[in-house]
Amino acid sequence: MVDLIKFYLENIKISEYILATKFIKIKKDEFEHFIVDPNKISFLSQKVKAEKVDLSKSEIVVQQENIMKNLSYKNKFISFKRKLKEEEGRLTVCQNIRKDFIRIKNLNPMTDLNYLNFVEIIEMYADEFEIEKEKFWKAKITQVELGVNIRFNMNIASIMSSVSRMKGMENTLRIGNTVNFKNQKYEVSVYDKLERESQQNEVFKNASKVRRKHLVKKISKNNSFVRIELRVKTVSQFNQALIKSKIKTLGSIRNNFHSLGKELYKLFVNISFVNEISPDITQGLVKSQLNSKSEKAFDEYLKFLGLKYFGVKKFIEFASPILNTNNRNKYLASLEDLYNQYKGDNDFVKKQFFRKLSARINKLIMPAISSSN
């Protein structure tokens, strides 16, 4: 359930041995700045066992520069900063702990962290830096991504084409099989997880790029993996109070893992759907419904035809930023309902999506309930 996370510990002492064997000193001013060498951390290293090689000073410099470029590119790092001649400082960790756990356990890349997995990977970090676990759990969180992967037995396009908008979000950005809902405080993304993992070479690792693309396309005809994710870039400014109270520290996530999952579900169900995959209602049925009906029925059918011609999601995205904010959500919801009523089985994708989302979250939080008993 937890993916990328950034947290820090103040007034922490890291032994000189750990600093010398797992960190690289990158600069020295009024502070000493260190950054972790990922090849020296068991669950970060891409190498199973790194052979000891005697390097010249210039080769070491080049190697360190390459490490820094790699970390900068991925925007993930572990750093330690302390004032000169002092032992204590600030440890900052910014890592995708889900991928860390998958790597060390050699798991399927679609794996989500349940309660026990989350506890295990956090305590692995504490052990790695020889920091007391009780103290490590008090680390303050500044950024976090929370989400789940959901598997469907249908084409990815059928799902993504039905995702419409999200209540409380100012902007909707669509790129391919990715939909991002954004406002100033946080972001929710729904995207094709299999396609993303393929692009990052996390699946079919031994296949060529062309072969990998072919395999993904073949699988996606009747199967799909969708990720839904909440991204909080600044926890202190996050305005969802019931979730915010549970993500302030590592310990607050651990202690509230079950209720956090429930709150995530409540947030995600603010996503609305329009049905673009089932067939249109037949003209004969439309005519029979309009017989002896009021003008309202005719007006609504004309609205449906207009939405269908223009594109219902396209019209909603066009109208959303220019509508009066007091009436926007109610009006856009009425358009979605109107559009859906002229489609057969109009809640199929929505029902499937939220049923599977609920089941997935419940499965991940179940170990938290067992551990509390």
Image (tube, helix red, strand yellow):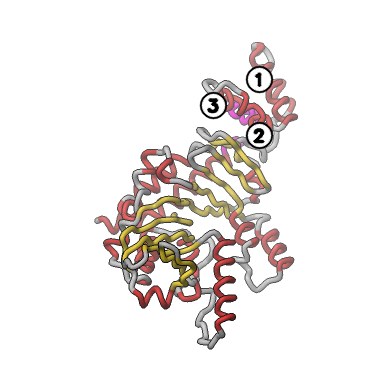
Q: 10 Å neighbourhood of mark 3: few (<14), some, or many (≥20)?
A: some
Q: Which residue is mark 1?
A: 300
Which residues, given as a range, are shown in magenta? Answer: 336-347
Q: Are marks 3 and 1 in contact (CB under 8 Å)?
A: no
Measure the alpha-carbon separation of dots 3 and 1: 18 Å
Give the residue drawn at x 52%, y 33%. Answer: 167
Quarter of image, res 120: bottom left
Residue 26: percent from left, percent from top: 49, 68
Residue 68: percent from left, percent from top: 55, 67
The answer to whether residue 339 is magenta is yes
Give the residue drawn at x 56%, y 62%. Answer: 72
Q: Which residue is mark 2?
A: 313
Measure the alpha-carbon separation of dots 2 and 3: 14 Å
Report the mark closest to the observer, 1 or 2.
2
Q: In the image, is 158 to the left or to the right of 364?
A: right
Q: Are marks 1 and 2 in contact (CB under 8 Å)?
A: no
The answer to whether residue 27 is magenta is no
Mark 3: amino acid: Asn
Q: 10 Å neighbourhood of mark 2: few (<14), some, or many (≥20)?
A: many
Q: Nearer the viewer, residue 157 or 282?
A: 157
Q: Earlier in the sequence, mark 1 or mark 2?
A: 1
Q: Does residue 334 sit above or below 159 in this rendering? A: above
Q: Earlier in the sequence, mark 3 or mark 1?
A: 1
Mark 2: amino acid: Lys
Q: Which residue is mark 3?
A: 329
Measure the alpha-carbon separation of dots 1 and 2: 17 Å
Q: Nearer the viewer, residue 75 or 365?
A: 75
Mark 1: amino acid: Glu
